C-alpha cells in the first residue's frame, strides 16, 4: 500500500496551483471537517492537524472547524454527508483504510464509494500491536505464543468496528504467524483509538491494535509498550526503536492511509480546488514536520488517481475479508 509520488510531480502541481488555475470556486467563511469518531482517534488527528495547517498557511480564508461525529465505524458521518450535505463544498471528511474496509464489507447499508468524491491521501499510518507498560508480553512472538496456546486468552481493543481495519490487522498478523482458528481471537470495538488505549492502560484488555499516529503520546510517556509496527521497515526517528513484525518472523504489513472525501454532488470546480489545495499542503515543510512527529510515512495520491486507488483497495479488501471468513 506504500506509494510515494515523485517530488518533481509535487513541485509541478504546487507551481500550477500557485500560478492560479482559474477555478471559480474559493471557500468563504469557515470550513467544516468531520472526524467520524470521538476526539482522540486517527480521524480526529487528521482533521485537526490538517485544519490547523490550512489556517496557518493562509490557504483558507477563515477557520477550519472539526466536528466529531462518531458511530458505525464512520457510517454515521458517511450517511450524514450523503443525505444532508451532498452539495456542501466547504465540507471535508477525514477518511482512511478503515473507511474503505467498511465499504468493502458492505457495512454502510445502501451506500457505496461512488456516492462521495475522494480528494486526497496525505500520508500512511502504519499499524501497531501494543500492550500496557506492565504487561508480561515483551515481544510479538510472546503474544503469538499465548494466542496459539489459547486464542481466547488474549483480547484486543481497537478503534474500528468488529471486522474493520483494526480487527483485520490482528487477523492478518495472526494468520501470518501460523495461528489456527483465528476467528476465535477476542476483539472489542471502541469509538476511537484513544478510548481503546484507555482500556489497555486500565488493565481491562490484553493488547491494543491501532495506528502509530494515535499512539505516539502514550508511547512517549511510556504507558504503551509496542510489540511490533506493521511496516516494511523501521520507522524514522524518534520511533526507530520499535521492531517490525517482519523482523520478528511475522510477514505482515498494515498501512492505513490518511486523507479526505467530500460530498458527491459538489461542483467540479470546488472538487478540483480541494484536490489542488491538498497537493499544495502535502508539499509544505510544515506538513512534512507533522508527518515525522506523528509517525506518518510518505504517501500521496489525489483526484482521479486517488479515487481509482480507493476503488481498487475496496475490491482487494473485499477479497481478503472473504478469504479470512469475515464476509461471505
Image (cartoon, grey):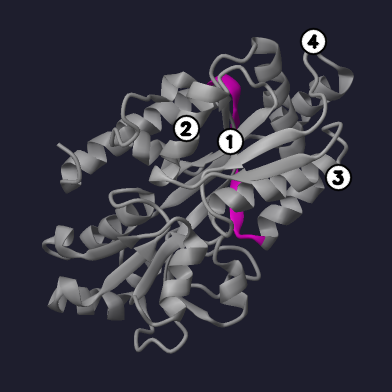
Q: Are marks 3 and 1 in contact (CB under 8 Å)?
A: no
Viewed as shown, does residue 312 lie left or right of 192? left
Tell me the residue that label 2 is attached to: 78
Please provide percent x and percent y for residue 288: 73, 50
The answer to whether residue 233 shows anywhere in this view is no
Q: Residues within 10 Å of mark 3 (few under 14, many from 20)?
A: few
Tell me which numbered mark, 3 or 2, is placed earlier along the sequence. Answer: 3
Q: Are marks 1 and 2 in contact (CB under 8 Å)?
A: yes
**Front tag of 3 and 1:** 1
Q: Looking at the picture, does residue 321 appear above or below residue 264?
A: below
> For the residues marked 3 and 1, what is the alpha-carbon distance in whole angstroms?
20 Å
Q: Which mark is residue 143?
A: none
> For the residues marked 4 and 1, what is the alpha-carbon distance in whole angstroms?
22 Å
> For the residues marked 4 and 2, what is the alpha-carbon distance in whole angstroms?
27 Å
27, 19: nearer the viewer = 27
Per the rendered image, the range of residues in magenta is 294-304
Tell me the residue that label 4 is attached to: 24
Tell me which numbered mark, 4 or 2, is placed earlier along the sequence. Answer: 4
Q: Which mark is residue 93?
A: 1
Tell me which numbered mark, 3 or 1, is placed earlier along the sequence. Answer: 3
238, 219: nearer the viewer = 219
Amino acid at each position: 500500500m506504500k506509494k510515494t509520488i515523485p517530488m518533481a510531480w509535487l513541485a509541478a502541481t504546487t507551481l500550477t496551483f500557485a500560478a492560479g488555475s482559474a477555478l471559480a470556486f474559493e471557500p468563504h467563511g469557515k470550513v467544516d471537517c468531520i472526524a467520524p469518531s470521538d476526539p482522540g482517534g486517527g480521524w480526529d488527528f487528521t482533521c485537526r492537524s490538517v485544519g490547523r495547517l490550512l489556517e496557518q498557511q493562509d490557504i483558507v480564508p477563515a477557520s477550519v472547524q472539526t466536528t466529531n461525529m462518531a458511530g458505525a465505524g464512520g457510517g454515521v458521518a458517511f450517511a450524514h454527508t450523503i443525505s444532508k450535505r451532498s452539495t456542501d463544498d466547504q465540507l471535508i471528511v477525514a477518511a482512511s483504510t478503515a473507511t474503505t474496509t467498511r465499504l468493502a464489507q458492505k457495512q454502510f447499508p445502501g451506500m457505496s464509494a461512488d456516492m462521495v468524491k475522494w480528494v486526497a491521501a496525505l500520508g500512511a499510518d502504519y499499524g501497531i500491536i501494543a500492550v500496557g507498560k506492565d504487561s508480561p508480553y515483551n515481544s510479538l512472538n510472546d503474544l503469538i505464543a499465548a494466542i496459539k496456546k489459547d486464542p481466547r486468552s488474549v483480547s484486543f481493543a481497537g478503534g474500528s468496528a468488529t471486522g474493520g481495519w483494526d480487527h483485520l490487522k490482528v487477523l492478518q498478523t495472526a494468520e501470518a504467524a501460523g495461528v489456527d482458528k483465528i476467528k476465535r481471537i477476542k476483539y472489542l470495538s471502541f469509538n476511537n483509538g484513544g478510548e481503546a488505549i484507555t482500556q489497555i492502560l486500565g488493565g481491562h484488555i490484553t493488547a491494543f491494535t491501532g495506528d502509530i499516529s494515535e499512539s505516539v503520546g502514550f508511547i512517549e510517556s511510556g504507558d504503551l509498550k509496542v510489540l511490533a509496527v506493521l511496516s516494511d521497515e523501521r520507522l524514522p526517528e524518534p520511533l526507530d526503536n520499535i521492531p517490525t513484525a517482519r523482523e520478528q518472523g511475522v510477514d505482515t504489513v498494515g498501512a492505513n492511509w490518511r486523507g479526505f472525501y467530500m460530498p458527491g454532488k459538489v461542483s467540479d470546480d470546488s472538487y478540483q480546488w480541494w484536490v489542488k489545495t491538498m497537493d499544495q499542503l502535502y508539499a509544505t515543510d510544515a506538513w512534512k514536520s507533522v508527518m515525522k512527529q506523528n509517525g506518518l510515512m510518505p504517501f500521496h495520491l489525489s483526484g482521479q488517481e486517488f479515487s481509482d486507488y480507493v476503488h481498487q483497495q475496496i475490491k482487494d479488501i473485499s477479497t481478503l475479508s472473504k478469504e479470512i471468513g469475515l464476509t461471505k
